[in-house]
Image: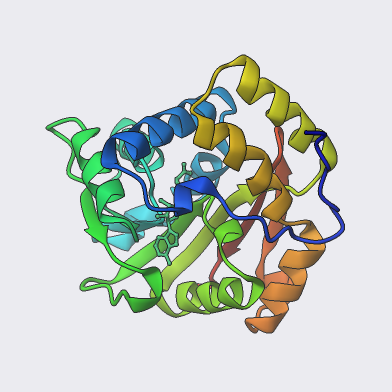
Amino acid sequence: MPHSAPDFRHRSKLGELMDEPCSRDELRACLRDLARVNRWTMAYRPLLHWLDTFLDVLPAHGEPLHILDVACGYGDGLRRIEQWAKARGVAVELTGLDLNPNTTAIAAEASPAASKIQWVCSDIFAYAPRRPVHLVVSSLFTHHLADEDVVRFLQWMEQHARLGWFINDLSRAAIPYHFFRVFAKVARLHPFVQHDGPVSIARSFVPEDWRRMCAAAGLGNRDILIQSFVPARLCVARRKPK
Ligand SMILES: C[S@@+](CC[C@H](N)C(=O)[O-])C[C@H]1O[C@@H](n2cnc3c(N)ncnc32)[C@H](O)[C@@H]1O
């Protein structure tokens, strides 16, 4: 069947296979391949650079830095943060949260025995953190939400993140969409990843979307930093004033 490319002027409403019910084994295989793509595309780099910008305030901070990773998936991003903290001697408390109980179980089983990450199964909008959260981060999450829920998520983070928050998602554009379609096939990635990768790009954002949704959440252009990272990442960072 001929492939019809989406209209990149608007966010696509196509669904993702990983959001459909499936077995734990199927989900594990999908999440493992997604983590491989994250590594190959250096997807952790934007967040790790941003975390480095907090190193100056940490000595005055006193308590462990509590970082919440929303929609943690396989947990590879949070395990990378745990390594970052260890390498820099930063005391952290790490929580990985995901809506799907199979996902948090898979993230826990993929973590080394020495890891201190806590895995929590919850819908972020129903989650009331038991302990104060300093930084809220997410990767490849916001494109799963409709615009009005992205605004709710921005408000949730503004309310709960004491120091700031960081969104790492994709840039909606034709070139990465077509490139990933071919790459995922050639690399024989899990069928869900072959399908969901290009769909995720089509469901994602351009900088103007972020300016509009942040404004709807009460945040002006000076409150946020929108940055592109090669390949195909578009990130939004918020550091709260002291
Ligand atoms: C594409 S995965 C992202 C995985 C990982 N963060 C990464 O970068 O590879 C999206 C995740 O969002 C989770 N999710 C979707 N809606 C959610 C919600 N309302 N609250 C918490 N997690 C949610 C899904 O269960 C899924 O694991």
Q: Residue at x 78, y 56 (%)?
A: 206
Compared with residue 26, is residue 64 higher up or lower down, i.e. above or below? below
The answer to whether any part of residue 196 appears in the image is: yes
Q: Is residue 188 left or right of residue 107?
A: right
Q: Is residue 35 left or right of residue 111?
A: right
Residue 211 % position (x, y): 76, 69
Q: Residue at x 75, y 27 (%)?
A: 179
Q: Residue at x 45, y 67 (%)?
A: 163
- Residue sticking out furthest to the left: 113
Residue 116 % position (x, y): 17, 44
Colour basis: rainbow
Residue 134 % position (x, y): 37, 65
Q: Quadrant of ligand 1?
A: bottom left
Compared with residue 77, is residue 158 higher up or lower down, i.e. above or below? below
The answer to whether any part of residue 56 appears in the image is: no
- Quarter holding the N terminus? top right
Compared with residue 73, is residue 143 higher up or lower down, i.e. above or below? below
Q: Is residue 192 left or right of residue 5?
A: left
Q: Is residue 186 left or right of residue 211?
A: left
Q: Nearer the viewer, residue 57 or 217?
A: 217
- Residue sticking out furthest to the top: 186
Residue 23 % position (x, y): 30, 42
Asked where in the image residue 131 lies, by quadrant, the reply is bottom left
How many marks are shown on the rendered structure?
Answer: 0
